[in-house]
Image: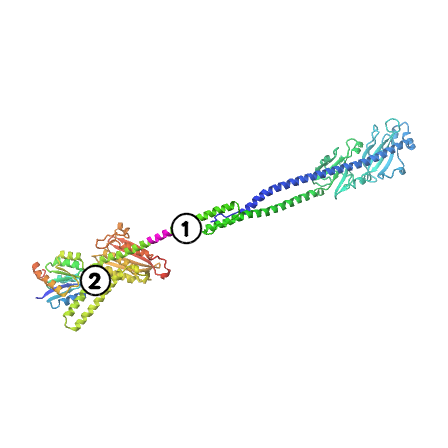
Amino acid sequence: MQSKKRRFGLSGKLVLAILAVGVIPLVISLSVAYYRGSNELQTVIGASFQALAEGSAAKVDAELQRIITVDRVLAQQAEDDPKVRTELLGNQPRGKNSSVVKFDWPPIAQIEPVIDALEASWVTGPEGVPGEVKTVTPTTDNAAARMTWLYLNSATRQHLLHISTPIHDGKGTTPAGWLHRDYDVKKLFDPIIYPIRFGSTGHVMLINNAGAIISCPMLVTGSRIEDRALLDLVTNNHAGWTTAENDGHGRRAFSIAGYAPLAGVNALLPPGESWHMFVWQDSREIFAPAKSLLISVMLAGLLSLGLLVALSYYASGHIVKPIQRLRREASRIAGGDLSQPLAIHTGDEIEELAGELDEMRIQLRQHIGTLEEKVEERTRELRENQAEKDRVTEQLIQAEKVAAIGTMASGIGHEINNPLYVIMGRAEAIRDEKDISACNEYARDIIKHTKHISAIVKNLSGYIRPASQHELEEIDVHQKLVEALAMAKLTLLDDRIEIRQNFAPVPKISAKPEEIQQVFFNVIRNGIQAMAGKKGILELTTTLEDNQVCIRIQDTGTGIRAEHLGKIFDPFFTTKGPDEGEGLGMFIVQKIVTKYNGLITLESQVDKGTTVTIRFPGAEPISRRTTNVT
Amino acid sequence: MLHKILVVDDEEEVRKTIRLQLKGTGLEVVEAEDGKKGIEVLDAENVITVDAILCDVRMPNVSGVEAITYFRREYPHIPVIVLTGYPDVKLAVDFMKEGVFEYLIKPVEKEKLVEVIMKAISQRSFVGGSGPKM
């Protein structure tokens, strides 16, 4: 009875449930782990980038301080230099023209070899620097060194850092002149910046707040960072780290940048200008650990998932197997096998369920046992009842036959008494006759008529014999019709009925001969009686229709009134007189015809006559018959 | 004295038996093979005087019942003896009511038959005299 197709087995559901329960927290925890891990990674990277930026800034700061210090020492020496004093300080009064005074100082030989970045060194008067040097003119109200940014020496294509240091003559605070020195920024900073590398792309770079690259191992000095947003992030006046969508090196990618201002340098720079250290690493490299973390997390997740699936299959199998066994046992019981007890020992609810089911099985077996007994008993009763019914029917058939004999009594008497009379007459003649040859003839007559009587008695006794003593036989319906007709005629006093026989070749039917003769006799007798006292035609016709033997018995008698037609086959229904029958004839006829799977139909018109049609299936080999004939 | 007996029976064997039984009794047999013929014999012009009728019941065409009714109505002076194989009391009573002289059931002995016929003939004069119907 599996009317519904199972879409999902219990095992599948269990696995799904376990997966749902296991996977969701797993995914959440892995996600959180990854998120936190990558966040912490960012923090660590950012902090180290910041530290690196600070360290690098301090180094550059220190280098610049060293140069400024050297320059200051030189500026003091310049005060004492007679040439300087003569050219600049001695040129009294110091006026407008002094500003144009310029000469290289100190002499190249004196330039300390440690500062190989130094490209030029000269002194000027207090008014400033030569016009071709595009620098901010040092203000005179500050004795501190002035560092001015960079300019491009168009002849050498060098980016130069210009530092102006005041020269005092000891008279007042106003500088008497300036020591100007140009440093090649690459030579100055690259030795500091370049070695600071980490990983394969990690490096530091020195930029100013305008985005100009002062020193970078990757980018050309003098080029610019155009991303203002990134610049704003990294050009703070404090150290820190940030994340950005631009790596500052021409790639739009998530990146982490550490930054730190050059505090010492910035103090010397003109207002609004500042230098910053910027630490950068290719985002791909930065996030390689994060990526590997992600891969590890995912691998761990997949491994956990696989483990979960395997475990859940194992677990569901453990749960489902007893249930499947229970189902098999249940369908065994449903199939009617109630003999074997259910033996499922799981020590849990399934075992309890199996126990209940087994209890049901025991009760079912008991009930079925009782039921079977009842059915058997009832079948026996029914069989007995049927046997009783069959016996009564047989008796009824026999009784009807005997009763019919009553209606034939006179006819039988007539039929027998006539030849008896002939016999008696011949015997008397023999007694009185002297002529031997005549006696012989009389004796022959006696023998002939004795045989005639014997034939009549034989026919009658064959008819009256109980049918149940006989087995089925293959019967020639024509022969039985003729025999029945002969008997039926015995019920008549007159002999004016014309008999017509239209017999077609038909197969034999399988039945008890006495019963078929009784059927034909009853129908023919009715027909003859319906025509009693008048002339009439009794027509007996046989045909083969649809493999059925069809017997039509037609009379031209009084016919049957419409209101009686429905009762013709009722027992004890009769329209005849008290001596002509008991009203069982057609009842018996129908019983016998039906018993042989036959069919009887009746058509009648008052004063025109009646036609009775009986159809029997043609005889089959008796062994193949399914008719329940008792 | 020669008497004529009309024997009405459809079976030749029966008529022959009657002939044999009445042979040498002085009774002459006139035969008819059914009721119709019997009536024709009686109704015929120049009819022979019939002293008694011996009639069967079951016959083709006109049955004995009809024939006897006719005989009794048209020739009441001629005694009718029923000679039949039907051992039927009701039939016998009906015939007796019709005025049939005797209802004999086959087989009947020669002596009995002759006795009944003779008795019928002897009583005939009391009933209605002799002579043909005019």
> Is residue A377 part of the magenta span, yes or no?
yes
The residue pinned by badge 2 equals A415
Q: Earlier in the sequence, mark 2 or mark 1?
A: 1
Task: Using a 10 Å C-alpha cutoff, classify the residue at mark 2 as few (fewer than 14 neighbours), some (14 to 19) or many (20 or more).
Answer: many
Q: Is residue A49 left or right of residue B72?
A: right
Q: Is residue A269 above or below residue A433?
A: above
**Toward which corner of the image does residue A193 lie, by quadrant?**
top right
To which chain does the residue with label 1 belong? A
Q: Residue at x 33, y 53 (%)?
A: A384
To which chain does the residue with label 2 belong? A
Q: Is residue B100 above or below residue A185?
A: below
Residue A70 location, x and y as percent? 85, 35
Name the dominant secondary structure of the magenta segment: helix
- For badge 1, the amino acid type reads Gly
> Is residue A418 part of the magenta span, yes or no?
no
Closest to the camera, between mark 2 and mark 1, is 1
Residue A194 location, x and y as percent? 79, 41
Q: Are marks 2 and 1 in contact (CB under 8 Å)?
A: no
Q: Is residue A151 left or right of residue B77?
A: right
- For badge 2, the amino acid type reads Glu
Q: Residue at x 22, y 65 (%)?
A: A452
| Magenta residues, start to end | A376-385
Q: Label 1: state its secondary structure.
A: helix
**Quadrant containing the C terminus of chain B in the rendered view:** bottom left
User: Is residue A391 in view?
Assistant: yes
The residue pinned by badge 1 equals A369
A282 or A463: nearer the eye? A463
- Residue sitting at the far bottom: A436
- Residue sitting at the far top: A172
